Every structure is written in structure tokens, then in C-alpha cells.
Image (cartoon, helix red, strand yellow):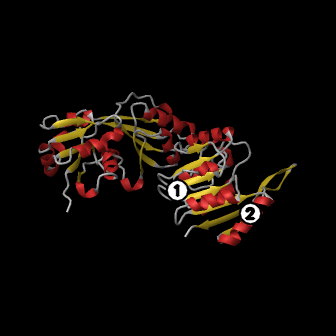
Amino acid sequence: MTQPWLHIVGIGEDGVDGLTPTARAVVEAAEVIVGGDRHLSLSENVSAERVAWPSPFDALIGNLTSFKGKRVVVLATGDPLWYSVGARIGRTIPPGEITYHPQLSAFQLAAARMGWSMADLETLTVHGRPVEQMIAFIQPDQRLLILTTGEETPGQIAKFLAERGFGKSRMTVLAAMGGDSEERFDGTAESWNHAVPAFNTLAVECVAAPDAALLPRVPGLADDLFQHDGTMTKQEVRAATLAKLMPMRGALLWDVGCGCGSVAVEWMRAARFSRAIGIEPRADRRVFAAQNAAALGAPKLELIDGTVPEALTGLEAPDAIFIGGGLSRQTFDHCWAALRPLGRLVCNAVTLESEALLMALHKEHGGQLVKLSVNRAEPVGGLTGWKPLIPVTQWSLVKR
């Protein structure tokens, strides 16, 4: 049976003195201690070889395995498996070779300082990630705890809130929690002007104005929230399309002919850590897609310049595929072959030629074939009448 040789220890602002007896014994017996400058300073009284995080950080695993055979400790802030380095290490080094020693996380400490129930809030990190991804979580009466990137992050988030009609939202920055130099800064988004320490955790209590933008994570955002040239999957059809695509945590979508990115953006908003690759040959529409992704909280949308099916070669196998443009039998064949088992494929067509192809594919592969017709009430002179949108033929199926 493999014996653990690597210990990953969570440490707080109170340093070694705040560790459990078991974790402290592990640290004090270490031959090699790996961590950031802050972690190493918190354990400076321990005699062991000190190794700082490597640059680039991807070299960490190689460095750790080179110490195998020694008593190795990695120091991390708080809980090593909650938005921390422990999860990254554990994806490469077998779990049987690692022992984790968690400390109270920044989220738990912040929740305690705020008096908030952790079951009733969202925990997020923008540390080393695009700050815009928190936008998807701006909701009326929502409580957020956010690990930040630095001293400028609270100001950036305050700006996002104010621009969307949440300027009255209450914000609290907590720094050095559990240490002698713990600090707290309170304010509102619309008037935030605090200079805060670089290492901090942000608590936000979202307060919506009567005219605030409502951006639910359930698919079907209003069309006017997207920048587009008129060619896009409209709100009602988009909601039906996402329902068939079934967004799931961490899943990957190919959005073929993504246009302004409305389907890909809503896919990424609908499930935590979901990803999307948009394939779009027109540069102006890729610009729209990138702007929409940033504005609506999906900044990690990957955009590819190319035509299908050629542009699909070499891409990571997806969990779902939406074909909204570039439909052909060759494109379908390539997509269907690449789709993972239990993957969902949805094709929308508005022309007779594309509809005929979907009918043929439905006959060969089964699935669901539906016609979506939407009418919107619009002014007709001084009165109101129904204006129909172009009907959409939708074919969907699951790969089994």
C-alpha cells in the first residue's frame, strides 16, 4: 500500500501556533517546506529547507516529486482543497501519496465576521482569474464571498455593481483575518473609495435599485443585453435551445457559428465552471461575442476564427454542441463523431435547405424535431398587434 509522503497543510495568519497538534508536528518534522513568501514567514521558526513557489508555477509538480523520499510539507492558506493549491496538486499526484491538513478557510472566517450562513451565500474566487466572471452572480439580495486578486479588485467589483443598478450594495473587505493586524473596511459600491491591503476577502450583499438590470442565470436573457448585428438566437428560442443543451458543472460546449455568442454566454452563466468554444468566421461577430462574454460574466469564452468543419479539428471533445450556423452534413458528421457519450447536440435552422437536412438527419438518427414559432406584441399604428419572428426548426438528440 502506498504511504503518504507529501503533507499539504493549511495555515492561517496565526501561523504555526494556530495549527492542530497533528499538523504542527508534521510541519516541525518536515525536511522540506514549500510555499509562498507569506507562508514561509508564518513558519520561520521551523528548521527545514525552504522552497518558494516556482516560476512558472506549472513547474511545481516536478519540484515536489523531486523531493519524494523526504518529509515534504506544502503550506497553503486556509483549506488547501478550497480554491487552493491542494486541488491542483491532487489532480496529478495520486491521492494515496498525500495527506491534507485543512485550516479554517477565508470563506469560513469571513462568514463568521459577517454573521452569514454559508449555506445561504455564493463563494467565488477571482484570484488569478478574470474579475468579470463574478458578474454572473449579481442578483437581488444575493450574498457573495469573493477571494480577490489584489487591492484593486474591490473597486473593480464596485464598478460592476454600480453599472448594473446595484450601487447600494454593501461591501466589506476583510484582511489578515485571525492575525494581530486584522482589518475591516465597510462601504457601498457606489461610493467605494477605500485603499485596502493586497491580500483580502470581499463580502458583498447585493441591493438592487428599482431599475437594476436583472440577469438571472436561468437561460433566456433579453436580446437587448447583447451587442449584435441582428443575427442572433432570439430570447425565446435561446431558452429552448439551452434547455436541450443541458448545461452542467464543468461541461464543455462547442458553439458552431456562434455569432454574437448569446448561446455560449448563457451556457457558461447557467452552470458553475462550464466552458465554451465559439467558432465564428466573421471578425465583427467575434468582437461582439467577446464583448458580450465580458459584460455578462463569461470572460473565459474561447473564440476561434475559422470555418467548419475544418476549424473543429483538434478541439477538445465536447459535452454538448450547438450548430447555429455553418450547418452541413460534413459539419454534423464531424460534430457527432467528436461528441462525448451522453453528449447533447442541438441544431437550429431557419432556411428550407437547412430544414430539409435536419429532417433527413432526424430520419437517420432519431431525436426530437420541433418547429418553434414566436410572436411578439408590437405597435401597429396606435394599437398593438402580433409580429411573428422567423420560425425555427430545431433538431436535438443525445448521444448514447
State the CA–CA distance, disc 1 to disc 2: 24 Å
Residue 143: percent from the left, percent from the top? Answer: 44, 48
Circles 1 and 2: CB atoms closer than 8 Å: no
Mark 2 secondary-structure assignment: helix
Residue topped by disc 1: 317
Q: Does the rendering let one see residue 373?
A: no
**Is the residue 354 above or below the residue 155 in the image?**
below
Mark 1 secondary-structure assignment: loop
Residue at image coords 24%, 58%: 96
Residue 285: percent from the left, percent from the top? Answer: 67, 41
Residue topped by disc 2: 357
Number of marks in the rendered image: 2
Image quadrant where one finds the N terminus: bottom left
Marked residue nearer the N-terminal end (1 or 2): 1
The amino acid at mark 2 is Leu
The amino acid at mark 1 is Ala
Residue 339: percent from the left, percent from the top? Answer: 56, 60
Image quadrant where one finds the C terminus: bottom right
Quarter of the rendering containing residue 367: bottom right
Residue at image coords 68%, 65%: 395
Between 82 and 397, the one lying in front of the other is: 397
Crowdedness of circle 1 by 10 Å Cα count: few (<14), some, many (20+)? some
**Is the residue 139 above or below the residue 241 in the image?**
above
Residue 223: percent from the left, percent from the top? Answer: 68, 48
Q: Does the rendering let one see residue 17?
A: yes
**Is the residue 47 above or below the residue 98 in the image?**
above
Residue at image coords 65%, 70%: 365
Horizontal side of 121 relative to 92 (left or right) equals right
Crowdedness of circle 2 by 10 Å Cα count: few (<14), some, many (20+)? some
Between 197 and 293, the one lying in front of the other is: 293
Horizontal side of 209 relative to 34 (left or right) equals right
